[in-house]
Amino acid sequence: MLLSKVESHLIDLKNKYNQAIGQLSLLEEQLDKKRKDFNQIQNDIQIWQMVQILFTKTTDAAREQLKTRIEETVTAALLAVFGEGYTFKINVRNLSGQPAAEWQVISRYGDIEVAAGPEDARGGGIVDIVSLALRLSLLELARPKPGGPVILDEPAKMVSAEYLPNVAEFLKQYAARTGRQIILVTHAEPLAEVADVSYRVMQRNGTSEVTRA
């Protein structure tokens, strides 16, 4: 009788342990997502600061030309990835005597236009593409223009799977147009498939194995 109680107690403890392990795994996944979201926010802040610096250090005429070029570049990226119905706009205003830039994504639904910040426009995918296009446009507009490759880490992680081939084509066209090499880390197969050279990293028994795809 005593043995059966001990076995029952052990089973109960094992069930609680397995439940705790499951909860820990879920919390670790949530923590990992929050860290990625935090890194994305830091990247967006960095881009915003770079745009602010550019607008602050340019004359009125140059600022208007810079604004137009960035708007055209980011709008082209949004159209290339998501199709018709999107426009990127920069609103420049004076803040404490200095020019400050705010950006909006304008979405068109028939005759209706809705303006919102990139983070509020149809989810994280819009933010990813705006962030990517801003980085690329700043790289090409900077004087002197930086050389070397473009290194991207999961640039489209929030973009829906149906639009990933469009992101791949956009990056391919950018590389062809500018002559820049793109070094890309991604889990998205459509992005990896357009690479001239790609390597796959697999984890086996705690060891990373790298093979050419």
Image (cartoon, helix red, strand yellow):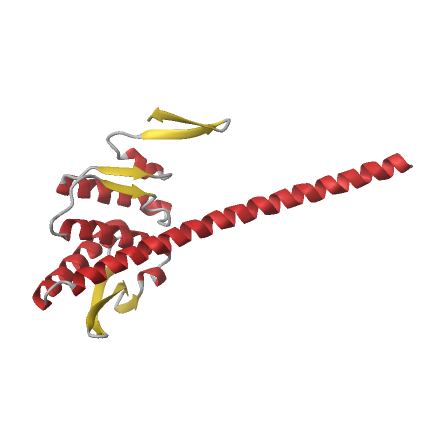
Question: Which residue is rendered at x = 76% and y = 39% of the image?
Answer: 11
Q: Relative to the observer, which residue lies in front, 118 or 150?
A: 150
Name the quadrant of the C terminus.
top left
Question: Which residue is rendered at x = 53% and y = 46% of the image?
Answer: 28
Q: Is residue 43 left or right of residue 33?
A: left
In this view, the residue farthest toward the right is 1
Question: Which residue is rendered at x = 51% and y = 26% of the image?
Answer: 205
Count the marks: how many? 0
Q: Is residue 85 visible?
A: no
Q: Quadrant of residue 196?
A: top left
Question: Which residue is rendered at x = 40% and y = 54% of the image?
Answer: 38
Q: Relative to the observer, which residue lies in front, 170 or 33?
A: 33
> Residue 21, how many percent across, how many down?
62, 42
Q: Relative to the observer, which residue lies in front, 203 or 75?
A: 203
> Residue 172, how many percent across, how many down?
21, 40
> Residue 75, how many percent across, how many down?
21, 57
> Residue 34, how many percent across, how many down?
46, 52
Q: Is residue 97 visible?
A: yes
Name the quadrant of the N terminus.
top right
Q: Is residue 189 left or right of residue 18?
A: left
Q: Is residue 12 left or right of residue 181?
A: right
Q: Is residue 200 above or below residue 111?
A: above
